[in-house]
């Protein structure tokens, strides 16, 4: 008897959590289909940009990114490029040093993208004035008219942060195709769908433009080594700054080519999402009382089940429950069909190619494998918290020692 009660409780709790996540995805997938005219008008003035490219052991990828940004139709006097070359090889640094850019070569003990951006801001020439900062990742490729389009969008948006449309630059392996599909689902749900309903779009790690003064001040507030994009999102929303999304301005991103790298990437993102949720949950009551719907939505978004984990749970429950109690499995089959429908709405037609059927069959195995990333993410978060606590204790002890010596 106890077994059945335990089964009912676990099944009910898990299904409720999954159903809430599926409902969220479905609503914004449908919203992403709404038409929205967001064509920026031609800007009357040219903004001065600083382009920051953090690069960690990227090799030739960063050179391709620099070449693409230097080949812009936008007047070259109106933008500067800074590459933060963190642990790059000597050949890469020598080649970068020959380009008309500012090359910074820090040697961080613990590298992170946030540290690289902070280092770039601290080492900018004091006499130069910038209107906006563009963040690109090493491996991003942009078209010659990209900065011109960004300038028009930034001028017409009237906000201090905009996100451009990041697309896959390659789809030559199963992992790369999965990555491309998941990227576009994210674009549909967390950016286009949100924009259609008047909510702030999610940041995407690169292809982002910020007001320079805002970025210069707030990037220094980030202390965590993980999830700098989500930390910046939280700061934007707490400052009531809307993030606009321009889906017709493209930045191309090189995707991972192996399933192992794909799963490792998802593991890091799960850790980042968990970290963001834990750090921002305390702001939820205040957001509700102040009716800050963007803030409420963002916190709920971080509390949702990550997509690969969601599909893994649905697949396992749909397969296992029929052998225990068939009636319990029916609702899992229904919710599975609903989430597949939501993701199909969010997937652009151009991604449905000759490899689609083969990749679709492999998807459940990848999703079930993603379940194991929960434990890795949980272990990483626990380790992070334990290390932070140990450092805090260490600082307290050092202060006590100094007091005693005095």
Image (spheres, rainbow, N blue to C red):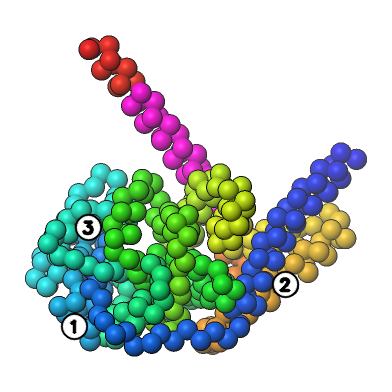
Q: Which mark is residue 383?
A: none
Mark 2 or 1, which is nearer the eye?
A: 1
Q: Quadrant of residue 325?
A: bottom right
Return the x and y of residue 294 as percentages of the image width and height: 55, 62
For mark 1, what is the residue? 75
Residue placed most toward the observer, 294 or 374 = 294
Mark earlier in primary sequence (1, 3): 1
The answer to whether 258 is drawn above or below residue 77 in the figure is: above
Magenta stretch bounds? 370-396
**Left or right of residue 50: residue 370:** right
- From the image, give the main secondary structure of the stretch colored magenta: helix
The residue singled out by tag 2 in the image is 338
Q: Taking 256 as reference, is 169 above or below it?
A: below
What residue is drawn where x is 9% and y is 71%? 98
| Quadrant holding the N terminus | top right
Label 2 secondary element: helix
At which x and y percent is residue 10?
Answer: 77, 48
């Amino acid at each position: 008897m106890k077994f059945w009660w335990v089964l009912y409780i676990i099944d009910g709790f898990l299904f409720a959590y999954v159903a809430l996540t599926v409902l969220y995805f479905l609503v914004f997938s449908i919203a992403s289909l709404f038409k929205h005219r967001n064509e920026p008008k031609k800007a009357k003035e040219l903004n001065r940009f600083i382009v920051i490219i953090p690069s960690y052991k990227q090799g030739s990828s960063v050179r391709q990114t620099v070449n693409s940004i230097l080949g812009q139709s936008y007047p070259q006097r109106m933008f500067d490029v800074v590459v933060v070359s963190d642990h790059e090889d000597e050949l890469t640094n020598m080649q970068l040093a020959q380009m008309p850019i500012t090359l910074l070569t820090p040697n961080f003990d613990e590298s992170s993208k946030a540290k690289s951006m902070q280092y770039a801001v601290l080492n900018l020439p004091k006499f130069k004035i910038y209107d906006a900062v563009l963040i690109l990742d090493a491996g991003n490729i942009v078209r010659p008219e990209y900065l011109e389009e960004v300038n028009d969008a930034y001028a017409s948006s009237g906000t201090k942060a905009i996100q451009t449309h990041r697309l896959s630059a390659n789809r030559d392996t199963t992992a790369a195709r999965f990555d491309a599909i998941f990227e576009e689902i994210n674009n549909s749900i967390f950016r286009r769908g949100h924009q259609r309903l008047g909510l702030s779009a999610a940041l995407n790690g690169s292809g982002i433009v910020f007001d320079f003064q805002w970025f210069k001040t707030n990037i220094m507030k980030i202390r965590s080594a993980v999830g700098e994009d989500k930390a910046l999102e939280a700061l934007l929303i707490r400052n009531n700054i809307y993030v606009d999304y321009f889906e017709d301005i493209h930045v191309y991103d090189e995707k991972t080519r192996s399933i192992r790298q794909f799963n490792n990437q998802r593991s890091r993102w799960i850790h980042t999402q968990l970290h963001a949720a834990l750090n921002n949950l305390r702001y939820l009551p205040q957001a509700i009382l102040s009716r800050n719907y963007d803030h409420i939505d963002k916190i709920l978004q971080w509390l949702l089940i990550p997509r690969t984990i969601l599909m893994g749970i649905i697949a396992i429950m749909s397969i296992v429950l029929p052998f225990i109690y068939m009636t319990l499995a029916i609702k899992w089959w229904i919710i599975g069909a609903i989430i597949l429908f939501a993701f199909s709405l969010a997937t652009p037609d151009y991604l449905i190619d000759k490899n689609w059927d083969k990749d679709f069959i492999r998807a459940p195995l990848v999703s079930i494998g993603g379940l194991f990333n929960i434990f890795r993410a949980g272990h990483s978060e626990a380790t992070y918290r334990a290390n932070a606590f140990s450092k805090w204790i260490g600082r307290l002890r050092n202060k006590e020692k100094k007091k005693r010596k005095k």
